[in-house]
Image (cartoon, rainbow, N blue to C red):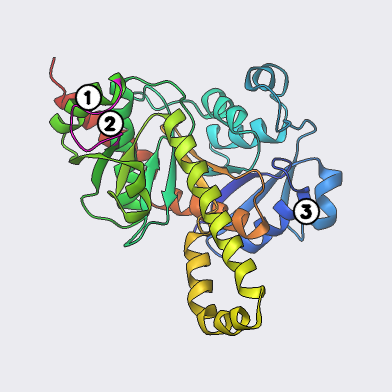
């Protein structure tokens, strides 16, 4: 069986390279071969036999994407993306600068022919099953036709990776009625309604964790705000619950009784479960991990990339968009 080679930006993210390397080592299997990109001297002491591709430059977390694209083409991030673009790897994973990762994807991997804008697709651990939020931050501004494509790309993700047949698609808005929302939402609604997607209408943000739909579509500004609000709320609630449990003897006793359920809830709501998000719409698979990703999150992100490569997600997205262009009026 041919292994899926996953290029890993070992210098990206908030944590030291050894954390990324540990995650890569944990993800290695008879089906997955992580390849580390970064400064050899920093990686070799921890590589444990993993292949290293030397890249001297590093894209900083606060670096402007335009500066990185102009001055850091030899960085670990851009080199890892180039490996996918040139066919030396089937997926790339980075916990580095998201904007720079988008620029690297566009320059080194390039867009699919019919794609207007790549989009970030994030799995949401909702009640009753996982949902896909798209776009979660790649495009702060978007047009209705972009959101229509996001719906198609998110559906492929839901069907191929999450195993959902005939994924339902909803549009994030401030009300369920078609006339609610800003101009972008109001103009996108009829496009989704007229498409071949299983469009179920508008949904509000309070329904996101209640499985509003299999795929929830929005512009990147709205999606990123919603995602970070959810992550912050979940973390705060779980942290406060822990404080209340250990604050008294009665709380500690109750904590022992609910510990199995609490652990299950925390695991289900933990962003590390998937480890990253696909940047869909490119000619190769790109997985963007959280900047503070632990080794567990990195391992899961690598697995997610390999899973997408094995499922031919890129080819499926390309075929879906090609079909939509062929049947579009005019």
Q: Is residue 217 magenta?
A: no
- Residue 138, compared with residue 289, is above or below; it is above
In the picture of the structure, the residue carrying the numbered disc 2 is 321
Q: Is residue 175 magenta?
A: yes
Residue 277 is left or right of residue 78, and the answer is: left
Precedes in sequence: disc 3 or disc 1? 3
From the viewer's perspective, is the residue at label 3 or at label 1 nearer?
Answer: 3
Residue 56 pos. (x, y %): 80, 33
- Residue 11, compared with residue 25, is above or below; it is above
Q: How many marks?
A: 3
Q: In 3D space, how far apart are the residues under numbered discs 3 and 1 (Cα atoms)?
A: 45 Å
Precedes in sequence: disc 3 or disc 2? 3
Camera-nearest residue between 258 and 34: 258
Residue 328 pos. (x, y %): 16, 23
Q: Residues within 10 Å of mark 1 (few under 14, many from 20)?
A: few
In the picture of the structure, the residue carrying the numbered disc 3 is 18
Q: In 3D space, how far apart are the residues under numbered discs 1 and 2 (Cα atoms)?
A: 6 Å
SS for dot 1: helix
SS for dot 2: helix
Residue 248 is tagged as none
The reply to whether discs 3 and 2 touch (Cβ–Cβ < 8 Å) is: no
- Residue 207, compared with residue 70, is above or below; it is below
The reply to whether discs 1 and 2 touch (Cβ–Cβ < 8 Å) is: yes
Residue 325 is tagged as 1
Instruction: Name the residue: 27% across, 29% down.
Output: 148
The quarter of the picture where residue 85 lies is top right
Query: Which stretch appears magenta?
Result: 172-182
């Amino acid at each position: 069986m041919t292994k899926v080679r996953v290029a890993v930006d070992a210098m990206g993210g908030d944590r030291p390279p050894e954390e990324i390397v540990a995650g890569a080592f944990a993800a290695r299997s008879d089906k997955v071969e992580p390849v580390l990109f970064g400064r050899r001297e920093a990686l070799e002491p921890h590589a444990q036999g993993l292949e290293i591709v030397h890249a001297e430059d590093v894209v900083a977390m606060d670096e402007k994407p335009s500066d990185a694209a102009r001055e850091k083409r030899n960085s670990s991030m851009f080199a890892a993306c180039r490996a996918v673009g040139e066919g030396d790897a089937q997926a790339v994973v980075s916990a580095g600068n998201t904007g720079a990762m988008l620029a690297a994807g566009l320059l080194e991997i390039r867009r699919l022919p019919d794609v207007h804008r790549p989009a970030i697709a994030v799995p949401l651990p909702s009640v009753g099953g996982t949902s896909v939020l798209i776009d979660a931050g790649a495009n702060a501004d978007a047009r209705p036709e972009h959101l229509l494509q996001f719906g198609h790309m998110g559906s492929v993700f839901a069907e191929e990776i999450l195993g959902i047949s005939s994924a339902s698609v909803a549009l994030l808005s401030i009300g369920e009625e078609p006339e609610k929302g800003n101009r972008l939402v109001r103009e996108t609604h009829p496009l989704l309604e007229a498409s071949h997607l299983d469009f179920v209408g508008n949904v509000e943000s309070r329904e996101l964790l209640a499985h509003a739909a299999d795929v929830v579509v929005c512009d990147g500004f709205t999606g990123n705000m919603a995602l970070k609000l959810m992550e912050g709320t979940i973390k705060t609630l779980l942290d406060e619950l822990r404080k209340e449990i250990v604050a008294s003897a009665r709380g500690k006793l109750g904590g022992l009784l609910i510990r199995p359920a609490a652990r299950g809830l925390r695991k289900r709501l933990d962003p590390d479960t998937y480890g990253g998000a696909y940047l869909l719409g490119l000619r190769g698979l790109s997985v963007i991990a959280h900047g503070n990703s632990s080794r567990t999150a990195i391992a899961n992100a690598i697995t997610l990339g390999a899973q997408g490569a094995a499922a031919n997600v890129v080819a499926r997205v390309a075929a879906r968009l090609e079909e939509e262009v062929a049947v579009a009026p005019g």
